[in-house]
Image (cartoon, grey):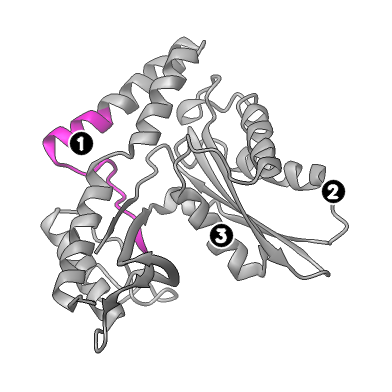
Amino acid sequence: MRKITEKIISGKVAQLCIDANLYLRKDVEAALDQALKKESNSRARQILKQLIENAELAGTDKVALCQDTGMPVVFVDIGRNINIAGVDLTAAINKGVEEGYRKGYLRNSIVTEPLTRLGTSKFSPCVIHFSFGKHNGLRLTVLPKGFGCENKTQLKMFNPTASEGEVKDFIISAVEQAGPDACPPYILGIGIGGTADYACQLSKVALLRPIDKPNPNRSVGKLEKELFKKLNLLDIGPMGLGGDTTVLGVNIKTFATHIAGLPVCVNISCHVLRSASDIL
């Protein structure tokens, strides 16, 4: 059984913070390239070229993809054959976030007092989700979430009698209301089921799935494809200036829920969907 220390964890989190903020995910990069090939609007094509160039320059010059380097959300999946006895995981992860954001010259966007907006922040605390898996090792994933798009999150508690059409309408309406404000083209993470809080967590987890990877649930995958087509007919387009490309991907994650309800959360990501993951 392998011992994993706080120093190892902090060092890995620090590197993931830098990687996520500097290097665009390959699936998102490929989606931008594909959108450029299909886009019929000349202005939208020009914007897509600029977004692709921005990603290339960020990686080459080692600068942040976006000035809003987000609030880091860290997913900790604790597997087998590791020894983390005595390790303060929360402290180690927050220390890693602080180290990574300082080393990577990433913007500090955290205020410690949400109501007064006061308090000196050391680039943390971050949001941490813990889970347990059957894999070997400790899987760490960093999702820096900018708040231009995070502010467009919508949660609705449907009656259990709600139709699939009503759920679709809600999701489409959430994108329509976001309009140009959250830097489209968007990637949608949608959580359906659980409780109100868990549906929101599911929507974040959904964003971690590569947007070119089919949903393991065929019926849910069919819904994703249908929403993708309908959302790209909204003519919001890249940066809200019109075009065929309003969304780059739609990812849905579902979970069991209570017989008396149907929670649905829509979490929107801008075109710079950032995450990085590794296993210790």
Q: In the shown orientation, is residue 30 left or right of residue 197?
A: left
For disc 2, the neighbor class at 10 Å (few under 14, some 14 to 19, many from 20) is: few
Residue on which disc 1 sits: 58
Magenta stretch contains residue 108: no
In percent of width and height, residue 32 lies at: 40, 26
Q: Identify which amino acid the numbered label 3 is placed on.
A: Leu
Residue occupying the point 40% across, 76% down = 116
Q: Could you tell me which secondary element the residue under label 1 belongs to?
A: helix
Q: Identify which amino acid the numbered label 2 is placed on.
A: Ser
Does residue 89 appear in the picture of this structure?
Answer: yes
Q: Which stretch is magenta?
A: 54-75
Residue on which disc 3 sits: 202
Residue 137 lies in what quarter of the image? Answer: bottom left
For the N terminus, the quadrant is bottom left
In percent of width and height, residue 98 lies at: 19, 68
Magenta stretch contains residue 64: yes
Q: CA distance from mark 2 to mark 3?
A: 20 Å
Does residue 151 appear in the picture of this structure?
Answer: no
Q: Could you tell me which secondary element the residue under label 3 belongs to?
A: helix
Residue occupying the point 83% across, 62% down = 159
Q: Could you tell me which secondary element the residue under label 2 belongs to?
A: loop
Give the mark toward the camera: 2 or 1.
2
In percent of width and height, residue 49 lies at: 34, 19
Q: In the shown orientation, is residue 200 left or right of residue 167?
A: left
Residue occupying the point 63% across, 38% down = 224
For the C terminus, the quadrant is bottom left
